[in-house]
Image (spheres, rainbow, N blue to C red):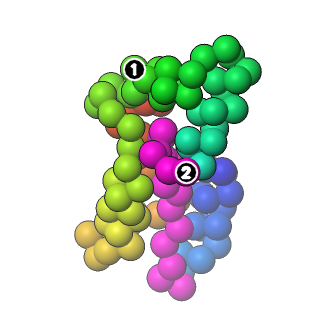
Amino acid sequence: MLGFTQSLAKEVARDGIRVNCVCPGFVRTAMQAREAEWEGRLRGMTPEAVLTEYVSLTPMGRLEEPEDVAEAVLFLASDGARFIAGEALNVSGGAFMD
């Protein structure tokens, strides 16, 4: 995904178009709830235990909310990010720093 983001960013930069990638972590959504149920069945765990494990993998100590991702997207779309292109922004509470 990063390679595609960078390639597209190079392609359209001269037209004043910025392309970036937002990489969320464990976002609290209905889709994540279904994932926790599925993973729980595979691993012999309750969905709540799966979600607790997700929280334990997130240094900021909570599940991500959709608003956390939305705020990052709003920033990248703002003039505050006018010179940012071809980047991946991890919005994961630190979950994927390894």
Label 2 belongs to which residue?
30
Q: Residue at x 73, y 21 (%)?
A: 42
Residue 55 in view: yes
Nearest the eye: 6 or 95: 95
Instruction: Inspect the image, locate mark 2, and give the three-letter code of the amino acid beneath it.
Output: Ala
Residue 18 in magenta stretch: yes
Q: Which residues are magenta?
A: 15-30
Callout 2: 10 Å neighbours few (<14), some, many (20+)?
A: few
Nearest the eye: 7 or 56: 56
Residue 57 in view: no
Seen in the picture, residue 88 relative to 36 is either above or below; the reply is: below
Please provide percent x and percent y for residue 50. Answer: 53, 24
Please provide percent x and percent y for residue 85. Answer: 47, 63
Nearest the eye: 93 or 97: 93
Instruction: Inspect the image, locate mark 1, and give the three-letter code of the amino acid beneath it.
Output: Ser
Q: Residue at x 30, y 28 (%)?
A: 61
Q: Is residue 67 left or right of residue 96?
A: left
Residue 19 in magenta stretch: yes
Nearest the eye: 42 or 89: 42
Seen in the picture, residue 93 relative to 91 is either above or below; the reply is: above
Q: Residue at x 50, y 61 (%)?
A: 20
Q: Residue at x 46, y 45 (%)?
A: 27
Label 1 belongs to which residue?
56
Instruction: Give the label, 1 or 2, closer to the camera.
Output: 2
Q: Earlier in the sequence, mark 1 or mark 2?
A: 2
Asked where in the image residue 41 lies, by quadrant, the reply is: top right
Please provide percent x and percent y for residue 87. Answer: 48, 54
Please provide percent x and percent y for residue 40. Answer: 64, 24
Residue at the extreme left: 80
